[in-house]
Image (tube, rainbow, N blue to C red):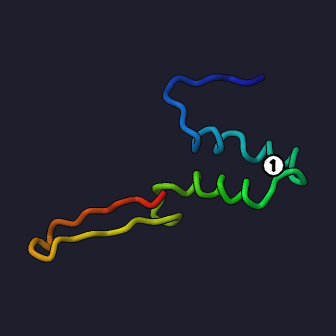
């Protein structure tokens, strides 16, 4: 039985909670591009996934901005 938890839903959370079950049932139907797009969603805003771009002003090197890749 499925349960619904309180809180906001994100694509990442939906994939985290359901990906393994879906893959085990539909492995032969999943295309490379579909798997790659799911990987991108799962790794969005993760430092060890797609990573971040780091920017610093030459005049103010102590002010650093991290922009996540998505």
- Residue at 53 percent of width and 23 percent of height: 6
Q: Nearer the viewer, residue 63 or 3?
A: 63
Name above or below for residue 58 compared with residue 22.
below
Disc 1 is placed on an element classified as helix
Snapshot quadrant of residue 28? bottom right
Relative to the observer, which residue lies in front, 50 or 4? 50
Answer few, some or many: residues within 10 Å of disc 1's Cα (few below 14, many 20 plus, some between 14 and 19): few
The N terminus lies in quadrant: top right
Q: How many marks?
A: 1
- In the picture, measured across the screen, residue 65 lies left or right of residue 34, that is left
Report the residue that reaches farthest toward the bottom. 58
29 horizontally vs 39: left or right:
right
Q: In this view, which residue lies farthest toward the left? A: 59
Q: Residue at x 82, y 53 (%)?
A: 30
- Give the quadrant of residue 19: top right
Q: Position of residue 55 (x, y in %)?
A: 27, 69
Judge from the rendering whether residue 19 lies leftward or rightward of residue 10; answer left or right. right
The residue pinned by badge 1 equals: 23
Residue at x 64% of width, y 45% of height: 16
Task: Determine whether 45 is above or below 18 in the image.
Answer: below
Residue farthest along the front direction in this orientation: 33
**Residue shown at 50% from the left, 66% from the top:** 48
Query: Residue 42 appears at what percent x and percent y?
Result: 59, 53
Q: Quadrant of residue 10?
A: top right
Q: Position of residue 23 (x, y in %)?
A: 81, 49
Left/right of residue 32 with respect to residue 17 in the rendered view: right
């Amino acid at each position: 039985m499925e349960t619904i938890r309180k809180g906001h839903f994100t694509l990442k959370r939906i994939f985290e909670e359901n990906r393994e079950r879906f893959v085990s049932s539909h492995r032969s139907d999943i295309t490379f591009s579909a798997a790659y797009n799911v990987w991108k969603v799962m790794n969005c805003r993760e430092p060890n996934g797609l990573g971040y771009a780091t920017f610093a002003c030459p005049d103010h090197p102590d002010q650093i901005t991290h922009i996540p890749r998505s």
